[in-house]
Amino acid sequence: MKKSLILILVCGIFVPQLSAQKLSLQDNNKVSSEVSKITEIVLPAPEMGGGMPLMEALAHRATNRRFLPESLSEAQLSNLLWAANGVNRTNLMKRTAPSARNAQEIDIYVCMENGVFFYDARKHKLTMVVDKDVRKDMSNQKFVPTAPVVLVFVADFTKMDGFSDEAKEFYSATDVGYVSQNVYLYCASSNLATVVCGSFNKDYLTQLLSVKESGKVLLIQPVGKMEE
Ligand SMILES: Cc1cc2nc3c(=O)[nH]c(=O)nc-3n(C[C@H](O)[C@H](O)[C@H](O)COP(=O)(O)O)c2cc1C
């Protein structure tokens, strides 16, 4: 089968650059079984030139819970993730969101129709960690699965060596707020709808992403095109 056809079949939602490989996940190995299928989405470079002036984006920043069923474009997904917590100073490997003591402990998982993906900010790519649609299972709030993309923010406590348990809780809770606000501002500037949610099925996501001991699922944030 032609590679382009495989890409469309597997990704469905957009046609990013993909590389086929066995599922060999991040260091923290989120999934036990290997799945032989295309598991990586290499995102296009984020577009630095677009969007609104910051003051206009702040004027438009709002919660919206009504999403069109349409997918985001590959450029929108790339821009969204980079804005959320991408690397903005490659020489220092620092991020668009600040973090206490530069721990960079907030990870982003991206839940879409075709699976759950880990966002590797350094490589600006997505790696599949679960090959099913979990959007309906992650919250009782009815609007959640209507969004084409649901971001899951997870604190990776293994990146917080030297923090007390209390400090891990406190600083990860503060740091996730910056990431969420970056998402809000990107959405405001691109006319996308978003809502950050503290109410979701934490036990389900904690188990799904195997973060019981090593971290904490903090917030979810659905994103999609705005229903007028
Ligand atoms: C930490 C946090 C958790 C939230 N959880 C939810 C939620 O579970 N469900 C929901 O519909 N909205 C949730 N919201 C969105 C708030 O309801 C919303 O921000 C608030 O009504 C103010 O509206 P605005 O964002 O348009 O200014 C949450 C917001 C924050 C900051």
Image: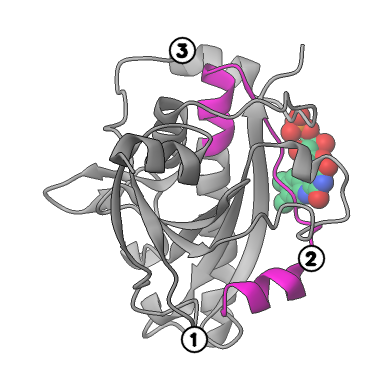
**Residue located at (48% from left, 56% from top):** 117
Q: Which residue is mark 3?
A: 52
Mark 3 surroundings: few (<14), some (14-19) or many (≥20) residues within 10 A: some
Quickly name the residue at label 1. 164
Residue 203 against residue 123 in the figure, above or below = below
Q: SS class of the residue under badge 2? A: loop
Check contact, mark 1 vs mark 3: CB within 8 A. Answer: no
Residue drawn at the location 33% of the way across and 52% of the way down: 121
List the residue tagged with mark 2.
Answer: 201
Residue range highlighted in magenta: 183-210
Q: Quadrant of residue 127?
A: bottom left
| Mark 2 C-beta closer than 8 Å to ligand 1 | no
Alpha carbon separation for disc pair 2 and 1: 26 Å
Q: Amino acid at mark 1?
A: Ser
Residue positioned 48% across, 76% down in the render: 30
Asked if one can make out residue 126 in the rendered structure from this viewpoint, the answer is no
Mark 1–mark 3 distance (CA, rounded to whole Å): 40 Å
Q: Is residue 100 magenta?
A: no
Give the side of residue 193 with respect to residue 85, left or right.
right
Of labels 1 and 3, the one closer to you: 3
Q: Amino acid at mark 2?
A: Asn
Marks 2 and 1 close (CB-CB < 8 Å): no
- Which of the marked residues, 2 or 3, is nearer the chain's N terminus? 3
